[in-house]
Image (spheres, rainbow, N blue to C red):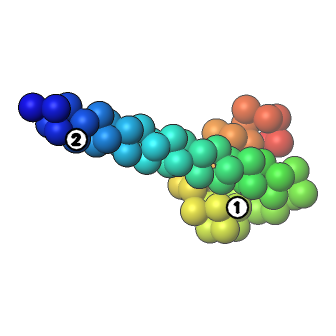
Amino acid sequence: MCNLGEGIYEDGLMKGKQVGCEGGRKEGKLELALELLKDGMALDKVAKYSKLSLSIIEELAKKNKLI
């Protein structure tokens, strides 16, 4: 029984780390996209290089009053 609890704990810990890493990656992509937009790069190019959807890039640009 003790090993079962440890296994569940470890599984939860690993899933939490994965979620955190994925969130951090997306945040990094958004930061990159914003900097590219500020430098005047076209929306479609920003989407291509950041690997984010064009709709997310458009929303980011509007939110930051870049379009």
The quarter of the image holding the N terminus is top left
Locate residue 16, reporting x and y percent: 41, 38
Q: Indicate the quadrant where residue 5 lies.
A: top left
The quarter of the image holding the C terminus is top right
Q: CA distance from mark 2 to mark 1?
A: 42 Å
Locate residue 52, reporting x and y percent: 57, 56
Q: Indicate the quadrant where residue 7 lies.
A: top left
In the image, residue 50 sits, relative to residue 64, either above or below, namely: below
**Disc 1 residue crowd, few under 14, some 14–19, many 20+, Cα 10 Å:** many
> Does 1 sit left or right of 55 as displayed?
left
Mark nearer the viewer, 2 or 1: 2
| Amino acid type of the residue tagged 2 in the rendering | Gly
Query: Which dot marks residue 55?
Result: none
**Which residue in the structure is indicated by mark 2?**
7
> Does 24 sit left or right of 2 as displayed?
right
Q: 19 or 65: nearer the eye? A: 19
> Does 19 sit left or right of 43 as displayed?
left
| Amino acid type of the residue tagged 1 in the rendering | Val
Q: Is residue 31 visible?
A: yes
Q: Indicate the quadrant where residue 41 lies.
A: bottom right
Locate residue 26, reporting x and y percent: 58, 48
Who's the residue at 60% across and 45% down the image? 24
Who's the residue at 46% across and 43% down the image? 17
Locate residue 15, reporting x and y percent: 36, 42
Residue at disc 2, secondary structure: helix
**Which residue in the structure is indicated by mark 1?**
46
Who's the residue at 73% across and 36% down the image? 62
Q: 20 or 43: nearer the eye? A: 20
Residue at disc 1, secondary structure: helix
